[in-house]
């Protein structure tokens, strides 16, 4: 079972920041938070991941709370092409089955003009 | 360019027939995965392989089989024992578990949509 909880859907106006929340209250000390997104009928695309510190790359920022029980993915200036299902996943960084990605249902983000 | 390729993109199968979905990667990744996705649902893990000649069952392996004879290839066979095979199938790969997490993200193919007619 997925170890994360996300809202099923969200809307965002084009050009505004999209803030996608994720709860992972049972996360363990060696589990990372990963974000992927899936545009309709395509394979998921990696966005970002982090352990404790906030992370930023060319696609998004990841804010992880101090207790690590929740995180927020931020798309700073959402465009229509960011409309997709966003998956938050927690996973160990080690080998074995614990390293597998377990997907929940994600959040369907709709960016509107 | 390096990447992961699934073929075909669309596949139709008659009930009772086995069918094999192809997944090839030239990323030199050790680990490969097969997922199934049903409409409006997340991905569910069917099988995974962390090294050549070894593979493990995922959460929904019944009615499926795989092989991993080469590092680059991880074909999935949907057998006639799979009761509800119509779905979107996704293959993924990533660098060896346990190695640098800078390379820890998984790369996905574009999927194969299987329809049983």
Image: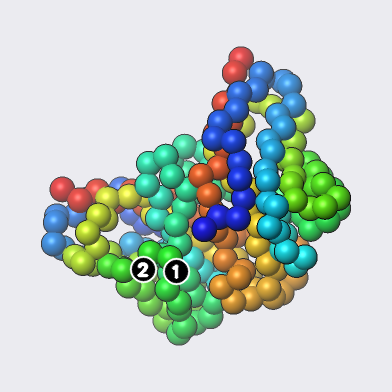
Most extreme residue toward the top, as rendered? A113
Snapshot quadrant of residue A71: top right
Q: Which residue is mark 1?
A: B58
> Disc count in the image?
2
Q: Within 10 angstroms of label 1, few (less than 14), some, or many (20 or more) residues?
A: some
Q: Is residue A28 above or below residue B117?
A: below
Q: Residue at x 37, y 41 (%)?
A: B39
Q: Within 10 angstroms of label 2, few (less than 14), some, or many (20 or more) residues?
A: some
Camera-side residue of B38 and B52: B38
The chain under label 1 reads B
Camera-side residue of A66 and A107: A66
Most extreme residue toward the bottom, as rendered? B53
Q: Is residue A2 above or below residue A23?
A: below
Image position of B79 (left or right of B43): left
Instruction: Residue B103 in the image: state x and y as whole percent.
Output: 70, 64
Q: Residue at x 75, y 67 (%)?
A: A30
Q: Which residue is mark 2?
A: B61
Q: Is residue A3 above or below residue A40?
A: below
- Residue A55 visible within the image: no
Instruction: Residue A40 in the image: state x and y as whole percent.
Output: 47, 37
């Amino acid at each position: 079972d997925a170890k994360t909880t996300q809202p099923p859907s969200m809307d965002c106006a084009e050009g505004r920041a999209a803030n996608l929340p994720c709860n992972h209250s049972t996360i363990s000390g060696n589990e990372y938070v990963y974000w992927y997104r899936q545009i309709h009928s395509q394979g998921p695309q990696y966005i970002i991941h982090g352990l404790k510190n906030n992370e930023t790359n060319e696609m998004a920022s990841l804010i992880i709370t101090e207790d690590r029980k929740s995180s927020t993915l931020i798309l700073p200036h959402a465009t229509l092409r960011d409309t997709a299902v966003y998956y938050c996943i927690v996973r160990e960084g080690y080998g074995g089955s614990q390293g597998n990605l377990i997907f929940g249902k994600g959040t369907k983000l709709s960016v509107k003009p | 360019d390096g990447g992961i390729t699934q073929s075909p993109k669309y596949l139709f199968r008659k009930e009772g027939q086995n069918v094999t979905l192809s997944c090839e990667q030239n990323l030199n990744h050790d680990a490969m995965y097969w997922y199934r996705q049903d409409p409006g649902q997340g991905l569910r893990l069917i099988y995974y392989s962390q090294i050549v000649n070894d593979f493990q069952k995922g959460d929904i392996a019944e009615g499926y089989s795989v092989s991993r004879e080469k590092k680059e290839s991880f074909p999935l066979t949907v057998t006639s024992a799979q009761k509800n095979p119509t779905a979107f199938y996704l293959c993924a790969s990533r660098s060896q578990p346990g190695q640098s997490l800078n390379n820890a993200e998984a790369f996905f193919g574009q999927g194969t949509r299987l329809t049983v007619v």
